[in-house]
Amino acid sequence: MKIITIIGARPQIIKAAAISRAIRNHFSSKIQEIIVHTGQHYDENMSAIFFEELQIPKPDYNLNVGSGNHGAQTAKMLEGIEEIILKEKPNAVLVYGDTNSTVAGGLAASKLLVPLIHIEAGLRSFNKSMPEEINRIACDHMSTLLFSPTKQGVENLQKEGFKLTNQKPFTIDNPRVYHCGDIMFDNSLYFSELASTKSILSELNLTGTFILSTIHRNNNTDIPERLTAIFEALIEISTVNKIPVVLPLHPRTKKMMETNLSPDLQKNIASSQYLKIIPPVSFLDVIALEKKASFVVTDSGGVQKEAFFFEKPCIILRPETEWTEIVENGNAILCDADKDRILNAYQVLSKKPDLTYPPLFGDGKAAEFICSEILEHLG
Ligand code: UD1
Ligand code: UDP
């Protein structure tokens, strides 16, 4: 069978490694994967860096859409993906997560009546002012096979009318919902050992404890008060506790810091002896950092989960999360972009509460399961 996989933003490129690896190792004679990169992310360290390191096949197509307003960006992707589907005539289209590339792939496939496979189905923030929430709801409702990484995801879908009792043949009107575990858990396990060979810790002179932080959500970067509160909190925690904070900076944040932070705060950040702001790093480098960090402070969906995979407490710079299990289990605290809440959460988690890390995200074999179900029902 032939599937078209749509990728575009950094986390999807990384996710694609798990499915491509499963196809290569177990299904190469049965599944042909055509990879379409929309070009949503395009800097070397947001895209190209991942392909070789994670053994992801080179994209068969790159639409090179680049950045832009959401409507224009999504429209360009839609047009390009539609043309490719018409030419390649796949049995199915596969999309990951909740970005504009995801929804463009979903729309293109469903309008051409090609079955859609959604990996990371069912996640909800219940906050429709997030562009991702609209994208993921739309994609779930355009899909034929929905693979949810968590039990909560399946429950969310049931509340929206999806039935677990549907029988094959599965279609967009009679979809199949799976609870299958998280392909990013597969990836984190698979790449963990390789990450130990990386030299980023010594390159950054990290000999003791440190905090890993990432910031990129639009409602943190684009609202000056929120971005200011986050940076003030990071400076205070690092200075008071004399602990370095490593911050691989997303290009969006780099750009918005220049306009949304006061000149004084920008000066404090530049002169801080503890804040190590670096360009985005490779996935193996992030894992190397996550494994050795004592804390993670992030607004990233992927990074908050990887903190859990590598058993690190996490401060989430958002008012809510789709990964509710890690908050309910006490491993992460939602702090929004509120300086006092961030400082307080740091105190609480520093006291080393008795945290456990139960197997909430599967057995590391989600990708193989997904491929075998795709083959069985859409092949
Ligand atoms: C996108 C996703 C978000 C995901 C994130 C992962 C949407 C709506 N958002 O957000 O869900 O969590 O990717 O990182 O799809 N830029 C560069 N170089 C690049 C890419 C982006 O400079 O290679 C800059 C551009 O100024 C661009 C801005 O970053 O305008 C935002 O990029 P965009 O892809 O629109 O959204 P993200 O914030 O990256
Ligand atoms: N990541 C990376 N390099 C970095 C920062 C993050 O490879 O400098 C990885 C991270 O390990 C995770 C993924 O990118 O697997 C998360 O992407 P991002 O935070 O951009 O998006 P989100 O998960 O919030 O959609």
Image (cartoon, helix red, strand yellow):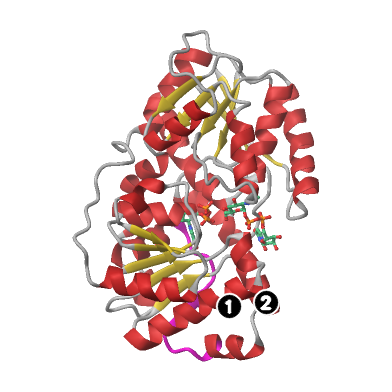
In the depicted structure, whether residue 185 falls above or below residue 249:
above
* Residue under the image location 31 percent in, 75 percent down: 347
Highlighted range, magenta? 270-283
Amino acid type of disc 2?
A: Asn
What is the total number of numbered labels drawn onto the structure image?
A: 2
Query: Of 233 and 252, which appears nearest the observer?
Result: 233
User: Would you say the residues marked 1 and 2 are in contact, meaning their CB atoms lie under 8 Å apart?
Assistant: yes
Residue situated in front as seen by the camera: 58 or 272: 272
Q: Which residue is mark 2?
A: 260
Q: Is residue 30 visible?
A: no
Residue indicated by mark 1? 228
- Quadrant containing ligand 1: bottom right
Q: Which is more N-terminal, label 2 or label 1?
A: 1
**Quick check: 346 left or right of 250?**
left
Judged from the image, the secondary structure of the residue bearing numbered disc 2 is helix
Q: Secondary structure at mark 1?
A: helix
